[in-house]
Amino acid sequence: MNESDTTSFLQLESRTPKETYGAAELPAAPATSSASPGHTCVRWVTVEPALVLTMVSVGLHGPLSTQYLWERISQDLGYNGSETSGCSNDSSDPLQKEVDTLSAHWNLYMNLGVFSVGLLSVPLLGSWSDIAGRRPVLLLCSLGFTLQALLYILVIYLRLPVFYFVIGKVISGLFGDSNILMAISYSYVADNIDEKSLTLRLIILEACLGISGMVASIIGGEWLKAQGYLYPYWFTLAVHLTSILYMYLFVCESIVPDKSAKLFSIDNYKACWRLLSRGGSVSGQGGRFQRSRLWLYLLSAILIMTTNTGTSSLYVLYELTSPLCWGPDLIGYGSAVQNIAYLVSLLALKVMQSCISESSIAVMGLISTILGQVVFSVANTTALMFTGYVVSLMYIVPIPVLKSKMSKMVSPSEQGVMFSVIGFLESLLVLVSLSIFNNLYPATLSFMKGFSFLFAAIVLLIPSGIFG
């Protein structure tokens, strides 16, 4: 993207909503709402604490479920890698390869479960939130996480078949999972904050993900090592219940809800299609050029999210087996370093955006990601693996830049639709990326264990060219 692109968006950001949309198009100001019946709303209370609580629990789920699957499969097949503190040094061990392959495939099935139903639930719930309000969707999403945690506890306690992990993911996906949680959180902040402060608040939301990830990674590995799987999952259940309580009692509604709004309506899907076909209300006068610009941003986001999601699903499996042979503690520390990227990336974005264009900052983030993936592809020691995490500390930068650009292309009444479209694409891309990377990883173990990471680095050259 050229400099005029960034300049035009910065000029747009400085305009008031009335100047941008016209007085007739502005949504009505939210009436005084209540967080619960008879409860006076506290306006300074916002969604970030609930987001942190929920994402801490979600951050614990991922590595714990991956390690539990690996150990259960190892025990079923009689592989001793799950019974010792180390693992086999023979990378050509056929039993180890079978464990790795089955673990990768079950991870694929779990993620296919959540995101296949998310393809339908995310745009539905996101569009509905523009009419019915943000709080109902936030509460539904947390309810889905709570039911998933309950089922996982039963699986571990009763040693049920690992297929029930897939069912838990499907339940969470029906309620939108983390995609709708983030979409509604972005929309909630956009409802309450003026445009001049919006970028900073979106940065804070992204930082919440990093903080949550670091906390979950640090406590998850050590806790698993000390007490096993059951107690951490009881903790995730308690955290989800606390999040529901916080949302119900303290989080105010940010729009005037229409009580007659129907959740199961084709109009909710039509709103998403209108947004994509028109290119956004703000860009309506630009016609085909502005619509093409939105699609170009979406293409860049698609490629970046595909590689980020696909490779992140492989890190734990890559670290568990030879030659790294990491235990739960090192896996936790590795995930914590990776999550520091949220804070580092967004701090870099905040500091550098006054000096260089946002597109240039995004290119720097892509270069950081590409170099990190190259290091991962050849990592055969703990030091080299951590080097890859450090090199890629700016991998978060491109996505917030793209979300900021796309958010400015739509009206205030379309924020839920815009972010739900992004969430829909994330769901679709998880299906695609996990299908690619979880099949590519076992297929390339025989000649290059880290080939999947090298493949991701090559794909990221495309959005680098688009931004450049």
Image (cartoon, rainbow, N blue to C red):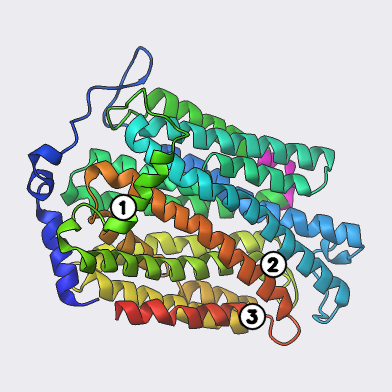
Q: Amino acid at mark 1?
A: Leu
Q: Is residue 44 above or below residue 404?
A: above
Of the residues under marks 3 and 2, which one precedes in the sequence? Answer: 2
Which amino acid is tagged 3?
Gly
Name the front one of labels 2 and 1.
1
Considering only vertical position in the picture, is 266 above or below 311?
A: above
Residue 450's label in the rendered image is 3
| Residue 405 relative to residue 355: left or right | right
Mark 1–mark 3 contact, CB under 8 Å?
A: no
Question: Disc 1 versus disc 3: distance between alpha carbons?
Answer: 39 Å
Question: Is 53 above or below relative to 6?
Answer: above
Q: Is residue 288 above or below residue 12?
A: below
Residue 287 x %, y %: 19, 63
Q: Secondary structure at mark 3?
A: loop
The image quadrant of residue 464 is: bottom left
Q: Magenta segment, which residues?
A: 225-233
- Residue count near mark 2 (Cα–Cα under 10 Å), binned few <14, some 14–19, many ≥20: many
Counting every numbered tag in the picture gives: 3
> Which residue has dot 1 on it?
275
**What's the CA distance linking mark 2 and mark 1?**
39 Å
Q: In the rendering, which numbered label is found on residue 226?
A: none
Residues packed near mark 3 inside 10 Å, few (<14), some (14 to 19) or many (20 plus): many
Residue at 46% of width from left, 58% of height from top?
Answer: 425
Give SS at disc 2: helix
Of residues 72 and 393, the one nearer the viewer is 72
Q: Which mark is residue 317?
A: 2
* Chief SS of the magenta region: helix
Query: How far, Cα to Cα, is label 3 from label 2?
Result: 11 Å
Q: Position of residue 111 (x, y in %)?
A: 63, 55
